[in-house]
Amino acid sequence: MAFWLCVIFCLVTFASSTPPDDPVKCKSRNTICTVTNSYGAFPDRSICEAAKVEYPRTEAELVSVVAAATRAGQKMRVVTRYSHSIPKLVCTDVKDGILISTKFLNHVVRTDPKAKTLTVESGVTLRELIEEAAKLELALPYAPYWWGLTVGGMMGTGAHGSSLWGNGSAVHDYVTEISIVSPGSVSDGYVKVRVLSETMNPEGFNAATVSLGVLGVISQVTFKLEPMFKRSLTYVVRNDTDMEDQALTFGRQHEFADLLWLPSQGKVVYRIDDRVPTKVSGDGVFSFFPFRSQVSLIVAFVRSLEESDELSGEANGKCVRARQLSSFLLRIAFGVTNNGFIFTGYPAVGSQDRMMSSGSCLDSHQNGLITACPWDPRIKGQFFHQTTFSVPLARVKAFIKDIKALVKIEPKSLCVLELNNGILMRYVTSSPAFLGKEEKALDFDLTYYRSKDDPLTPRLYEDYIEEIEQMALLKYNALPHWGKNRNIAFDGVIKKYKNANLFLKVKERLDPSGLFSTEWTDQILGLKGNVTVVKQGCALEGLCICSEDSQCAPNKGYLCRPGKVYSAARVCTRVSA
């Protein structure tokens, strides 16, 4: 009953919440700074420092900032308005480095309705991009579900939605031109602005479309859009008996298909989502419930319940609340409404700009943190790991069967995922971007509990999650999402990209001194060292794959053991005394 009260109370809370904090904090105006992500912690929980932060408001100001830093030989990294990437992509690595924020580079540069193109600055959010396109009666065909990402952030990490249709679901595959500001020579005035296009300079363009921020600062981006259209959405719940077969064909049957798997419940939610003509009646809105503002006290209460479950060592409470949460979300169609206010039934039909993405917890009024996004680090709220990877479509059936084999061993093991909306599965296709997806694949998104106070605290059934993670990355050669994941996902990852050398060639040309590179980016690009951190308890937070008990939590009964289905895995397993 307490759980239902808290859910209902959350549902009727204010449409607006306390705005997210700036990820950059400085001691003296814009100097002596630290930077974090929107969750308040990187995978290794390190604090990233910088000498100062710059907030350019025009491309000319950006050019001046990069020139001055290049002349001084200072390291630079770009930070976005909300800094949503989990890995350390924003860190400068050195205390005298410079952060360049795109917070105020948020303007429309030009529009061309006839050519169906829209050029914006890189600090424009996905929500703003969608709205500006709609003013022209145009639409971005595919995009991530969370609209708090910026254009530059999406280009930096290869952000995507879900589709096998058209050019696929990655935002960067609908870009036709990129302006990027990089270090220059003395004769260039220490800075160079390049305009890269898919036709005039494809090599530079295909490197910049997924750049990891190591090529310079993307200043402007031109998108190729489509005439506005409508979508018809229906969620259907079925048992997961034949899901491994359905997953192979479902994405070809429906343009915006995705699947939400609830493995401990033996259920899967199919998103039947297709394009329909604008003349079809409907004014639906997709406002995903978990992305709405929540009452901070209730979020804290829910977090306390989860912490109690972890302390008890029993998953029964998690499983009960996971079933309740799933039932509730299905009742409210995950936040879809037929008219912007209430859900009256399927199908929900609405225009693309109102059905593709959401994130109303960013609709901000200061209210003293009475309400906030549920992961806001200033409240006692959600704190989690995210493991996200794309498994080649040809290997998805076997991978799903392996996960099912794990669930059969212990049905309660994956309730920890269902408390965070289950396993979201989105379709992606191959991309010409050098660091984009290599082939048609199904992207698996796992979100699960992380201790906020103690990195040496093991998690319930963490061995099952770790085995799935290692199984995907090592057995099935999955590609990790660049903007999510724990360290181990990126160990040796560059070897999985056939055009990695072409990317590195462009990097050397645009930034030969590596002023936009860091130890972290050098590690994931295979240039120097690797991302694993071997120390006591390192496997608990994905900093390493355990090879000995001390890398787990032997004092709490968690020892390094082989996987249960994928025997080559090495996972931290709770061993009875």
Image (spheres, grey):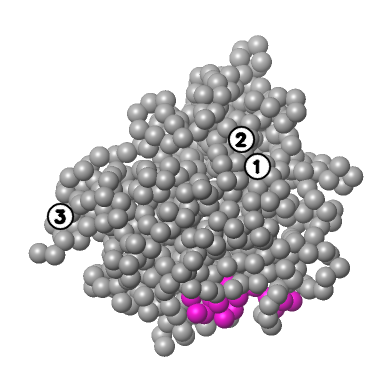
Query: Which region shows up in magenta?
Result: 326-341
Q: Nearer the viewer, residue 383 or 482?
A: 482
What residue is shown with label 1? Answer: 172
Q: Which corner quadrant holds the N terminus?
A: bottom left
What residue is shown with label 2? Answer: 433
Circle 1 sits in a helix, a strand or a loop, which is it? helix
First in sequence: mark 2 or mark 3?
2
Above or below, comparing residue 344 to residue 485 in the picture: below
Determine if the magenta segment contains residue 162. no
Mark 2 or 1: the one toward you: 2
Q: Residue furthest left?
A: 577
**Residue at 44% across, 31% down:** 495
Above or below, comparing residue 325 to residue 488 in the picture: below
Q: Position of residue 254 (x, y in %)?
A: 67, 61
Identity of the amino acid at label 1?
His
The reply, left or right, for residue 244 in relation to residue 409 is right
- Disc 1 to disc 3, how far (Cα)? 45 Å
Identity of the amino acid at label 2?
Ala
Circle 3 sits in a helix, a strand or a loop, which is it? helix
Mark 2 or 3: the one toward you: 2
Cβ–Cβ under 8 Å for marks 2 and 1: yes
**Residue at 71% across, 63% down:** 274
Query: Which of the labelled discs sits on residue 79, or is there none?
Result: none
- Disc 2 to disc 3, how far (Cα)? 44 Å
Q: Position of residue 227 (x, y in %)?
A: 83, 54
Q: Are there few (<14), some (14-19), or many (20+) residues within 10 Å of tag 3? A: some
Q: Residue furthest right?
A: 114
Query: Which of the labelled discs sits on residue 554, or is there none?
Result: 3
Determine if the magenta segment contains residue 340. yes
Cβ–Cβ under 8 Å for marks 1 and 3: no
First in sequence: mark 2 or mark 1?
1
**Residue at 69% across, 82% down:** 344
